[in-house]
Amino acid sequence: MPRFGSVLSFDAPEVEGPSPGRALYVPRGFWRDWTAAIHARYPSFKTVGEVYDSDPALTSFFQGGRAPFDGIDSGLDSVFDFPLQDAIARVFTGKARCASCQRCWHTTPSTPMRRAWSR
């Protein structure tokens, strides 16, 4: 497994957690190795990936916990829910009806945040 200098920097007390920005533009194999290195050293550490796109199919592709068609599990604990953010913004600006939020909610795979809200 490759070594990552960023893993060592997490020993600083002011670090709350990594946020892999722009996960879309980095090979998924990197995220698999990077998150494995983070979780090996800090098992309870949570990672959140950023895939800034309003397409649930694209953003969910980077959600860890499963290996989609490319056979690579990114290992990311969660991804930001930009599809739902976009749907909510469209409702509040009068560009869409509330039902678009419900459709977005039901078409995006489950994330830890969504599972918590569903309790």
Image (cartoon, rainbow, N blue to C red):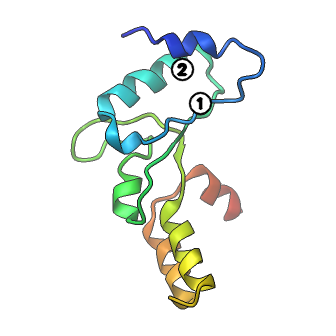
Q: In this picture, is 108 found above or below 12? A: below
Q: In this picture, is 99 found above or below 53? A: below
Which quarter of the image is occupied by the C terminus?
A: bottom right
Element class at badge 1: loop
Disc count in the image? Answer: 2
Element class at badge 2: helix
Disc 1 target residue: 18
Q: Nearer the viewer, residue 93 or 115?
A: 93
Q: What residue sits 77% from the left and 16% below the top?
A: 13
**Would you identify the image quadrant in which residue 24 lies?**
top left
> Is residue 53 found left or right of 9 in the rendered image?
left
Q: What residue sits 41% from the left and 40% below the top?
A: 23
Q: Residue furthest front?
A: 93
Q: What residue sits 48% from the left and 74% below the top?
A: 104
**Would you identify the image quadrant in which residue 12 lies?**
top right
Res 40 label: none
Q: In this picture, is 25 found above or below 91? A: above
Which quarter of the image is occupied by the N terminus?
A: top left
The type of residue carrying mark 2 is Ile
Q: Nearer the viewer, residue 110 or 21?
A: 21
In percent of width and height, residue 74 lies at: 39, 36
The type of residue carrying mark 1 is Pro
Q: What residue sits 58% from the left and 84% below the top?
A: 91
The answer for how far apart the CA atoms under marks 2 and 1 are is 9 Å
Q: Label 2: how many residues lie within 10 Å, few (<14), some (14-19) or many (20+)?
A: many
Disc 2 target residue: 38
Q: Are the residues at dot 2 and dot 1 in contact (C-beta closer than 8 Å)?
A: yes
